[in-house]
Amino acid sequence: MKTRTRVLSLSIPSYSSSGVGSSSSNTDNAAKSSSKTLRLKLSRLSLSRGGISSPVTATPSVELVSPVPHLLTSNIPPTDSERALIQDTISTVSAQNAALEASLNFDANTKPSSTTLKRLGAGQDFVHSHKAILSPVRLLPEEILAEIFSIYSESFLLEDHPHIITVSREGIIYPWIPSQVCRSWRSAALSLHHLWGQLIVDTCLWKTNKPSKSFMELFKTLVDRSHDAPLCIYFCTPPSADVEDLRPIIDTLVKNSERWSTVYLITPYSVLSAFEGIKGRLPALRRLYLSFAVEEPMYTTKETVLDTFEVAPKLQSVYLSSASFTGRMLLPYDQLLVFLDGGERANGRVREHVIPASASTLQDLSFGRFPMEDIQRPWPHSTLPELTNLIVKFENTGDEDDSYDNLQDNFFTHLTLPNVNRIDITNYPKNLLPVLSSLITRSFPAQQATTLQELSFSTYYLAEYNPGDLATFLELTPFLKKLRVYLPHTQDLERLVVIPGSDQPLLPRLEELCIFVYDSVEGCEDVLSQIARSRCEPILTNNSRNDPNAPSSTSPSPPTRLQHFRLVFPGAVLCHAGHEKLEESSRSASVIPTESSSAEPKDMEDRVALLKDWTPLASSLPSIFAFWARPARMGLKKMKRAFQVSQWFSMVEGIKIQGVKELYRSDIHHLMYHISLLPSSDLPGDNIYHFRKRARALLEKWSRLLAEDIKNRRWAFQGAQSVVYVPQDHEIRTRPAQETIESMIYGDKFYPQKYSVSWYDLQVVLQYQD
């Protein structure tokens, strides 16, 4: 009969943390006493009686009493004798933990007792807490601690995020936490006055209109502890805010206006006018973010003048968002380096002042939701010698309005940008190529190299360009490193292909290429694959460097390797269809025999047709397929729809897939992956028909087909609706097969709204979600 190891079942005393606050003079005696007690207890323990046939010996139980309880609740560094004692104790308890783990692993078929698991957990906690006492962090001087606190805070302080509003939980509770750990940490935290200078007043989150007593106490503490440090202020109120309710806060902020550095004001003009006391008292203000919560005709007219920030000698960055302010806004325009306009028609009175008044200083200029008709304004001819970034996003009208064809562009045609590095133009209402060509030629005369390295532009008129127009324009930008554009004609794409022995391709220094596909890549898949193979793979891009016979002085240097090649689609279904067209093109050009090149079974198309028919599923789950599914019939009950989904699952489960191409052409594996990760609440009837479990079972059944073929794949599905090219030397190909499948086929991130959302808005602004 099989005998099992018997483990002593003893009570588990928790290690004591008593004695906190004992004087350090008694530390050595306490350590010696605890050490003797520990050795005495170990010597008294013996193995239990009975035969032991396994190689695992019974485990004596060590009473977990800390030899240094006073160090468990403080950050005082241990003495040398305490350090030795702690290390000896950790070794003893670790040995007991290892023996317990071995006894558990020896008989894996027997459920371990709760007592044994508790002993093991207590021992592991004991070791962890005592190792922390030996951490070198306890030896750091206060100056180093302060530096660590400062570096950590940089990730969420308002000062370090000037372009966006970031009010994170960490930013609110920090620096209260380090100031309450121990005396040395508190001293370090209190010495960093700038950590306490982040003042967040968001009355939209309050339950009452007036600030509570506890809030005012915390607010006053922050102001006092910040001393003379610069203040980063986030002040947000709803449109209905009452100035008098906020008067104590406003008065405190006005009193300390000399320390304002970065300020976010999101509030109605009626509240902003209560800050009139700061006028002429903003010597440290560097960044200003203004957003008027609502238009207030009773307070503002076109004759209203906002001159609160007119005198601010260090103000260099202004961010104007949702400014429903129709009056005149006076700013120190002649010293601005950055002006970002979030985009409202009322902002036009500010925009028309920025370019002429800030022309000599501006480095970063961004107009959002630029009205189409605003380009007809009488913009002055302006040279912006310091401007490096130009971003103009026109209003998205949602349709192609022929009336814009006759607009006279007085904006771009009047600009000269001799040092521009990045140009981003979204939803331009006309043919943009002549305008851009004129801007580049005007900004960079003959014999002068262009500085433009990043270019993004979207327009509905790209398909109407003549073949070759885009390539002709891009010849003016030979130093371009990043390009984002709608899918152009194949004739333009062919100029990007590297052909050994031929002239350099278009854009020889290109490192990142993002092409936004309006619907399908059909007709372009071959040339897109050629661009990928010739510019993304390491062999062809470096062949001339490795050829000893290649001339070094007369031949041009090989083009830069394309580091990132992405195709973005407006929806998931179009993306998967385009993905497979690209893969088929890559396979047809490959000399490696694959399943795709073998004869296809005659009944394969019938199986693919069945697998592609998602109508029963889409009609029964309208919330998941809201974008393209037919509406569910009124009166169709949830359980009846769930039964229909179950029938559809049964049909899929009954199909015997013969090859991986059937998965690729039907996209059924993508659909099952999506269903397997959805919450049960999104799948009515899942508790009865187990849709997610069945989807996972199908994925498991198909995983072998995918794993065997993954080495032949060239493109990876990424983000919400895009694919990226994966070269042969990419590190992703060295991962385990299942991990590679996750990253290349299904994507690294799961989007629950994948099949219910159109991504056309991202297309317009030339953005994608990763």
Image (cartoon, rainbow, N blue to C red):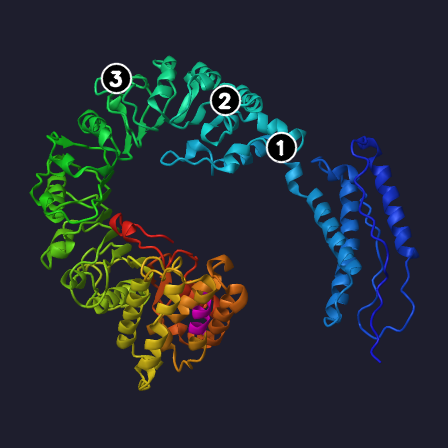
The local secondary structure at tag 3 comes to strand
Badge 1 amino acid: Pro
Of 586 and 458, nearer the camera is 458
Badge nearest the viewer, 2 or 1: 2
How far across and how far down the image is residue 50, in percent?
91, 71
Q: Residue 466: which quarter of the image?
A: bottom left
How far across and how far down the image is residue 220, in percent?
54, 20
Q: Does the magenta stretch include residue 258?
A: no
Q: Residue at x 39, y 73 (%)?
A: 711
Q: Residue 323: which quarter of the image?
A: top left
Badge 2 amino acid: Lys
Q: Return the residue at label 3.
A: 305
Label 2 or label 3, whichever comes before in sequence order: 2
Q: Return the residue at label 2.
A: 210
The local secondary structure at tag 1 comes to loop
The local secondary structure at tag 2 comes to loop
Q: Residue at x 75, y 38 (%)?
A: 71
**Residue 45 circle label:** none
Q: Residue at x 45, y 24 (%)?
A: 231
Please tell me how crowded label 3 is: few (under 14), some (14-19), or many (20+) other residues with Cα within 10 Å: some
Extent of the magenta region:
642-649
Query: In which quadrant of the rendered image does the C terminus lie?
Result: bottom left
Please tell me how crowded label 1 is: few (under 14), some (14-19), or many (20+) other residues with Cα within 10 Å: few
Badge 3 amino acid: Val
How far across and how far down the image is residue 83, in percent?
75, 43
User: How far apart, in angstroms, are the residues tagged by discs 2 and 3?
Assistant: 29 Å
Badge nearest the viewer, 2 or 3: 2
Confirm or deny contact between disc 2 and disc 1 (CB under 8 A). no
User: How far apart, in angstroms, are the residues tagged by discs 3 and 1?
Assistant: 53 Å
Q: In this view, does 325 lie to the left or right of 641?
A: left
Confirm or deny contact between disc 2 and disc 3 (CB under 8 A). no
